[in-house]
Amino acid sequence: MRSKRYPREKIIYITNKPLDEWIHFFNHISNKYKKELLGSLPPAKGFRKDSQQSFEYTLKQIYLDIQNDRANEDIEESFIGQMFNNWLQSNTKLDRLLNSYDNSEDFQNEKRPVPPNSFLDIRCFSYLRKAEYEGRISIEEIQFFYEFGYFLKDPLIDIIIDDIYDIQKDINLILEEQNKRTALIESLQKVLNKKTDDESRLLYLNKKVQLIEQAMEKMIRSTPDMALINEKIQTIEQSLATTKENCENSTTPINEKIQIIEQSLATTKENSENSTTLINQTIQAIEQTLETSKVNSERSISVVNEKIQSITQMIESIETTTLETQTCSDRKDRSLIHLTQVQMSESIKIAKSFEDLEGTIVKNFKAIGLIKTKAQKLTSEILAGLGSGSLITFSGSLAFLLAETCAKSLAAKNEIQVMHIPVGLLDSYQFHQEVMGCLNKASQSDYLTAIILEGINLSAFECYAQTFCQMITNRLVNQEASFNHVVCFATLAEGPACLPISKEFCHFGPIFHSDHVGWGSKGVTKRLREVQYQKKIGITGFNPVNKLKFQKIYSIYLKI
């Protein structure tokens, strides 16, 4: 089987695969062909020559170069094709099968061969599936051949490959059915065992019934004669008859008394009728008086309601005036610190790796006019400071531009919070409330959040920012990692209204002068890349630092 040229769509599909799939495919290549593939490249520093770790590190560097558009299309196609051929040569069984497969009809016209996914290409997968049924190759090898070969995604090829998995599904269903049958047999065995237990209980109950019957017979035999019982019954009947006569004799005086009571009740009834007329008359008089009092009370109630309404109106007017005065005072208090947000566009790129984040910051610094080498040095220093939990401070005429560029390059998905510090701020209450509000919003997000303090030397920093200073100090001495999802930037103002810059500002992090960072002759050359870093900034002591990245930053500091 002759190989065809990779289409550009397949090259893009393979380069967009995750790094783990590349490494998994690469590990199925023998060491001989790994060395043949990567032997022409410079060896990886810090690893043994021709070791598995050195091969994986070199492959990772090539993958990152392709992802960052540092390799042209011809290099990408040649490397992927060479890697696929080396994998194919490492799998001798699959290589032999493909050599015996004839697709020469696709190459009758050498100048214009048939493109990928031809009839012969699709039939090749049926040929490989048959070999898989016979146990000569595995499903994983067919999947690698399809994913990293020159074939485009095709539903017919997917159906052929998925049919291989359906056989395994049928086998699993047969095994599940067999397990169900064994479970059913076990449940039937339990029912049979329970039935034998019930039969034994029935025999036991029958024995108990026989014993009860025998005891009843003994009781009947032991009772006295029935004659004695009849005599007792007769004596009881005689005593009942005598008591009945006594009751009849005693009822006559009771009846006489009842008649006397009925006569007295008739006389009381006549007297009560006479009294009810008097009561009705008095009730009518009382009703008339009540009606007159009701009219008077309604008049008085209307007057009272009018007075209550006038009082409530007065109270409402007083409340509105007090609320207006309170709102005015609140506005005066809140007007000390102004909090604004930098609105971002909807097209925001997610940076998943530290290298991608570093490259984006360097490109943004170049876009605003920095020289490339200076931009790289400044980026390394800023990331080193953020990694230790420091406050990154900028001074000079372009201080806010640098702070805003760093914030857009790190935390563009969330709104960037900007706090404008006024002149003469002494109370720390409002600054504490604003900072805690920003931190609460940041804790609800899965991405980094950026805070910019503009003009921190317009007021005494140790007076109004006590809570903020404590947070930065705790991060620097590795006592607290609850706010490592927040990156903090600050700017220093210049002029007669500003306080002098003392050495205490350096306790919280580095200070970069924007006028001495290496500007080029050109201005803004292109639009900034708005990026959001997916991970949290690792503070030293909680998240391990990459050794290679640390050595790179250290070498840059030695050059400075």
Image: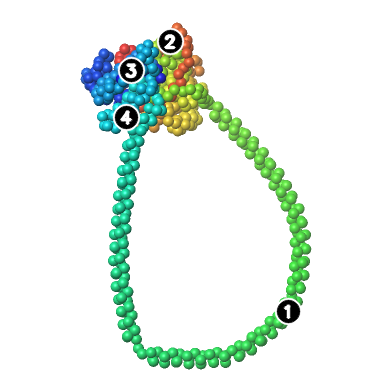
Badge 2 or badge 3: first in the primary sequence: 3
Query: Residue 430 at what x, y percent from top left?
Result: 50, 30
Q: Amino acid at mark 3?
A: Ser
SS at mark 2 in the image: loop
Picture layout, residue 311 above or below residue 292:
above
Q: Nearer the viewer, residue 317 or 358?
A: 358
Badge 3 or badge 1: first in the primary sequence: 3
Q: Nearer the viewer, mark 4 or mark 2?
A: 4
Query: Residue 150 at what x, y percent from top left?
Result: 35, 20
Q: Nearer the viewer, mark 4 or mark 1?
A: 4
Mark 4 closeness class: few <14, some 14–19, many ≥20 residues within 10 Å: many
Question: In this view of the protein, can residue 388 be seen by the observer?
Answer: no
Mark 3 — residue? 104
User: Looking at this rendering, what residue extends furthest in the top direction?
Assistant: 521
Question: In this view of the protein, can residue 280 be seen by the observer?
Answer: yes
Locate the C terminus by quadrant: top left
Distance CA(mark 2)–CA(mark 3): 61 Å
Q: Nearer the viewer, residue 7 or 480?
A: 7
SS at mark 4 in the image: helix
Query: Residue 413 at what x, y percent from top left?
Result: 46, 26
Q: Is residue 522 left or right of residue 56?
A: right
How many labels sit on residues? 4
Q: Amino acid at mark 2?
A: Trp
Badge 4 or badge 2: first in the primary sequence: 4
Mark 4 — residue? 129
Q: Amino acid at mark 4?
A: Arg
